[in-house]
Amino acid sequence: MWVRTGQLQQIDSALEAGRAEDIDGLIADILRTGASGLSTSNACAVCRRELVRSELQGVAIVFACPGEHGAWLSPDALTALRRLGRGHPTAAPRRSRIKTLSALLAASLAALAVSLALGVTPWRPMPVEERRYLQELVTVLGDGVTHRRDVEGVLQSKSEPATYGVVYGIYRERQGNVLARLKRLDVPARLRPVHDRILVATERQIEFYGAFTEARMRDDSVNLARMLSHPALRSSDYELHAAWDLIRGTYPGLDPAASQAIEGALCQFDVI
């Protein structure tokens, strides 16, 4: 069944807090909305983008929209959640999404290197320095995702105008550090065009949240939806999508797990 992002977050929060008894009620509420008929299992019901594999606190596998519109919950995932809600033991280790992506990327690229050494794939092997760069990139972007979500959460809430300004100042400093770390990465020549686009996207994102903050301080009815056409946001979104397209073009044989890890980091860093 198709589950909207807000509903999925409720399930995720219940799992994280150990409130297994809430799971059945949440699933029943979702079913009452008729959400199960909104999508197919391989495309987002809202934007039609291809879904990517993700996890709910290690309990169930879902296929989520990169734009965070929602996720497809398979019958197996639904069964696992219901078993947990009805008192059946199910392991649920809590892991950071970004740490998971980074670990997944590292493991996937290592496995890819072995396959290449054995001659399993027909395309050019990925050099060690490129594997290292991609792993470091995912890690740095993970911190950027945290800062982006923090400032956006405050800007979307009801607060005093001065609070928005203070929070943006903190975000600008922290995201500026992320930008500095990105600039210090040792970027292989073949991936320089990718890296340059990510740098531009980061700079435009800082600019966008500055504009969002100013607009929010002037008018507390302004929300993210009203800011989606802002040039800095559109530029940031474009550059991140272009960076991903370049990565896919550079590694046409990249295995699905590594592809998901890299795309997931870029999509979560993106505002839209």
Image (spheres, rainbow, N blue to C red):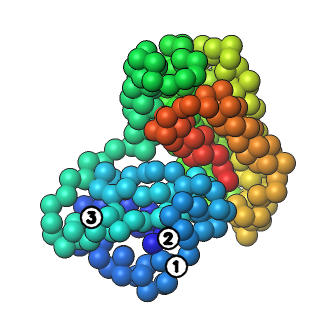
Residue at the spot of label 1: 37
Viewer-closest of 41 and 150: 41
Quadrant containing the N terminus is bottom left
Residue at horizontal 39 percent and vertical 26 percent from the top: 111
Residue at the spot of label 3: 80
Amino acid type at circle 1 is Gly
* Residues marked 3 and 2 touching at CB (< 8 Å): no
Viewer-closest of 162 and 38: 38
Question: Which numbered disc, 3 or 2, marks the residue that appears first in the sequence?
Answer: 2
The residue furthest bottom is 32
Amino acid type at circle 3 is Ala
Front tag of 1 and 3:
1
Mark 2–mark 1 Cα distance, whole angstroms, equals 7 Å
* Residues marked 2 and 1 touching at CB (< 8 Å): yes
Amino acid type at circle 2 is Trp
Helix, strand or loop at mark 2: strand
Viewer-closest of 227 and 151: 227
Residue at horizontal 30 percent and vertical 61 percent from the top: 15
Question: Which numbered disc, 1 or 3, marks the residue that appears first in the sequence?
Answer: 1
Q: Compared with residue 170, is residue 71 higher up or lower down, i.e. above or below?
A: below
Name the side, left or right, on which 42 lies relative to 20.
Answer: right
Mark 3–mark 2 Cα distance, whole angstroms, equals 16 Å
Expressed as whole percent of the image width and height from the top left, the position of residue 55 reads 39, 52
Question: Which numbered disc, 2 or 1, marks the residue that appears first in the sequence?
Answer: 2
Residue at the spot of label 2: 2
Helix, strand or loop at mark 3: helix
Helix, strand or loop at mark 1: helix
Expressed as whole percent of the image width and height from the top left, the position of residue 131 reads 51, 20
Whether residue 34 can be seen here: yes
Expressed as whole percent of the image width and height from the top left, the position of residue 253 reads 56, 31
Residue 242, numbered circle? none
